[in-house]
Each structure stands twice: as structure tokens, then as C-alpha cells.
Amino acid sequence: MKQALLDKINVFLLKKGFTVKNLAASCFDILSRKSDQILLIKVLEDANSISKGHSEEMLNVAAYVNASPLIVTEKAGMKLEENIVYSRFDIYTLNIQTFVSCINSRFPFVKRTKAGLIASIDGNKLKQKREEGGMSLNSLSKKIGVTSRMIVKYENENSEITINKALKLYDVFGEYVFNEINVFRQKNEMQSKFENEVTKKYIELGFNATETKKTPFDVIARNEDELILTEIGDKVNPNTASLSKLLDADNLVIFNKKKPKNVPSMKRKEFLDFEKANELVKFLREF
């Protein structure tokens, strides 16, 4: 089931003009890019199978590469409904039909929370539509099943309402009065953390940097527009170079004994001897 879903997503993204890179044994299965839009996608048979550790790493990597992290699946215990946004560990979770709609800029306005299905009202649009239709507060309140005071609150705030009330409001004004859920707008802060001296050195040089366990690279570092994917060791993962190219990032290998070919590389001591970030960037640019 997962492979069939992967194939559908890959074919769809390629048809929409995205460049697509698939990965195995990673915190994300697909990295895709079209112009400045970058997607990190985890494809699962069941969204409940993702661990908190995997999701946290995926969110952090997405923050470093300015990507939108998404989970695409058909179920989370139960089958996911179309045009509803779910969430797993703060990652938007969608079925493939909803994902396709979002890529086509048709965003849903209903999300699943612990409290059930809810929608967010755009207060200004609600007031505009009500007044355009010559409808009084009292008249609308009776249609929705709330007090006039509650309608005033809806118009003055971006209130979240239950799906039952949302459907009644939808019957009167359509989807125009609801806030779309743009699943690509997720913004996450880069988290810097280190256990090894390479990551610590990046941070000393002024980079944000963190180690990864479920990606082809070992360390990801960013300093303004400079993004570096770093591997540590003598075995080079061929996926890192293609990821670097897709992300407009630099690729660095810190080797122990065997120096790789055709990749910027150095021994650990050479890396630790850098005193300024621009010295490292210069080395990478001159390779």
C-alpha cells in the first residue's frame, strides 16, 4: 500500500513540474521542489505509526531547508476523510485527495482536533457577506442556532466553530467566510543541538546546526543563505550529493582515512581549525 501511494504522489508531482527525490530509511520519503516551493513528505500506511523522534527530526530538517513538512496517508487508525486536515506531532497530515487539492491551490477549511472537527471563521468576510445580503444579526443567529451576541463575536474575531455550526454557515454563505488551511505555510524554528565536536564547531562559527539520525547526512548547518549538508566518516551516501543539488546546498565530507572523490572533503582536524565561517564557505566555493 505504501509503495502504491508513493508511486501516485511521485507521478502527480512530476506532472505538476516538481523535481522529485525519493529516499529510503529516512525521516522523510520524498523531497520535491518546484521553484522556491520545497516539500518534505512522509508517506505512511497509517499515520499513527510515526514516532515523535522521527517527526521532530523531520520538522527540524524542514526548518533548515525552508520546506513544508507533510504526512500523506490513507488512515490514522481510521480512514482519513477528504478535504479535512489532520495532524501528527505538529505535522499536517492529509490523504492523497486532499494533498492533490492543496497542490492545486484548493485548500480545506476543516481540521480534526481532539475536540472533533472544527473550522475557523474569517470575521471580516462573515460581516461583509451578511451585510451584503441585508441579513440582520438576529436572522443569521437563528439560521446558525446561536445568539446574536455570538454572531458579533464571530465577526470581531477569527473564531473556531464546530463542524455542525460550520455546515450551517456554509449553507448560507459558502466557503468564502472560512479561513483556508494552507498546509504549506508551516514555519518552524531551527533548533541547534549537538553531541559531536563537528556540530559544536559549526555553532561556534555562527551557524545554526544540528545532528540527524534518519537522513543521508549527519549534520545540517545554515548561516543565512549558506546551507551545508555534512557527512562524517569514510562511507559516503550517494543521496547526499543529489539532495544538496536539489536544495542549492553545499555538500561536505569529513573523512577519517579514505578521502572521497569529487566531493569537498577534509579531515576532522582541518575542519576544527577553521576560525571564521567565511573561511569554510570559501573552501566550499573553490572546490
Image (cartoon, rainbow, N blue to C red):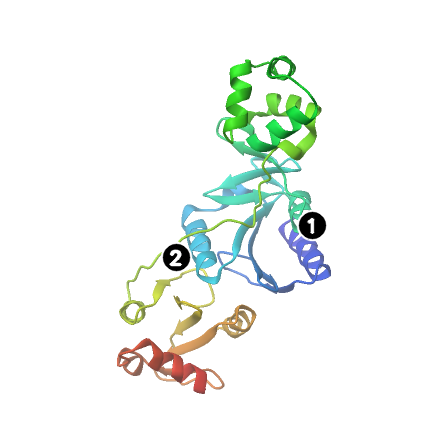
What amino acid does circle 1 point to? Answer: Asn
Q: Which residue is mark 1?
A: 104
Residue 173 is situated, as x and y percent measured from the top left of the image, at 69, 27
Between disc 2 and disc 1, whose residue precedes? 1
Does residue 244 lie above or below 94 as drawn? below
Does dot 1 land on a helix, a strand or a loop?
loop
Residue 120 visible to an observer of this rendering: no
Mark 1 packing: few (<14 Cα in 10 Å), some, or many (20+)? few
Does residue 268 lie above or below 43 as drawn? below
Residue 138 is situated, as x and y percent measured from the top left of the image, at 61, 13
What amino acid does circle 2 point to? Answer: Met
Viewer-proximal residue among 87 and 155: 155
Which residue is drawn at the image coordinates 70% and 53% (left, top)?
A: 8
The answer to whether marks 2 and 1 mark residues whose Cβ atoms lie closer than 8 Å is no
Q: Quadrant of residue 60?
A: bottom left
Q: Which residue is mark 2?
A: 190
Viewer-proximal residue among 201 and 255: 201
- Toward the right, the furthest residue is 15
Determine whether, in the image, residue 287 is placed left or right of residue 174.
Answer: left
Residue 150 is situated, as x and y percent measured from the top left of the image, at 52, 18
Q: Quadrant of residue 30?
A: bottom right
Q: Quadrant of residue 10?
A: bottom right
Which residue is drawn at the image coordinates 45% and 49% (left, top)?
A: 55
Mark 2 packing: few (<14 Cα in 10 Å), some, or many (20+)? some
Instruction: Name the quadrant of the C terminus.
Output: bottom left
Does dot 2 land on a helix, a strand or a loop?
loop
Mark 2 and mark 1: Cα distance apart in space: 28 Å
Residue 280 is situated, as x and y percent measured from the top left of the image, at 36, 80
Residue 254 visible to an observer of this rendering: yes
